[in-house]
Amino acid sequence: MVNGEFVGNMPLIKVIVAWGQSVQAPFVILDTGFTGDLQVTPKIAKELGLQIAGVTKTRIANGQIVEVPVALAVSSMEGLIEYIQVLISESMPLAGISFLTKFSYKAIVDCKYRKVVLEKVT
């Protein structure tokens, strides 16, 4: 089980993301409207040494379609390691539905009691 927290009205979780010899553990917004794995800022991508593998067209929250650089990285949650696709954007860092699916988690976001929990689904 992974516990997150609310900051303001944003549900945050900590993820471990790595590439090569670089590892970071940023807090990211748990965004159930984001269907990808992970989105990070150019600063985080540079610090990790991520190499852009291409560009993908992505529909953002306002409905606009934009082209976003994409890279490959490694992530770890509770000892399980998976390759993930990372979008690189000036927007807020996000973890999406595909990320949760790769690690077999279900998300419980309790706004009333301001709790965020990721539970393993077996």
Image: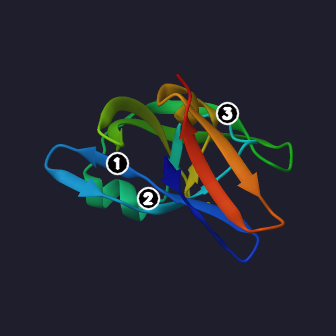
Lateral position of residue 55 relative to residue 109, left or right: left
Which residue is at 72% across, 43% downward?
A: 32
Camera-near label (2 vs 1) is: 1
The amino acid type of the residue labelled 2 equals Pro
Residue beneath disc 3:
35
- Name the residue nearer the viewer: 5 or 50: 5
Q: Say which element carries label 3.
A: loop
In the drawing, does residue 10 fall left or right of residue 84? Answer: right
Percent of width and height locating residue 60 = 75, 45
Picture quadrant where residue 63 is located? top right
In primary-sequence order, the first of circles 3 and 2 is 3
Look at the numbered disc 1 and give the secondary structure of its residue.
strand
Q: How far is disc 2 from disc 1 in space, using C-alphas? A: 14 Å
Are dots 2 and 1 in contact, CB under 8 Å?
Answer: no
The residue that label 2 is drawn on is 42
The relative height of residue 32 versus residue 12 in the rendered view (above or below) is above
Residue 83: which quarter of the image? top left
Q: Position of residue 101 (x, y in %)?
A: 56, 27
Q: Which residue does the numbered mark 1 point to in the structure image? A: 17
Which badge, 2 or 1, comes first in the chain's sequence?
A: 1
3 is higher (above) or lower (below) than 85? below
Residue occupying the point 82% across, 43% down: 64
Within-10-Å neighbours for mark 3: few <14, some 14–19, many 20+ = some
Q: Amino acid at mark 1?
A: Val
What residue appears at the point 52 percent right and 28 percent down from the top-left corner? 104
User: How far apart are the two marked residues, 3 and 2, measured between alpha carbons?
Assistant: 20 Å
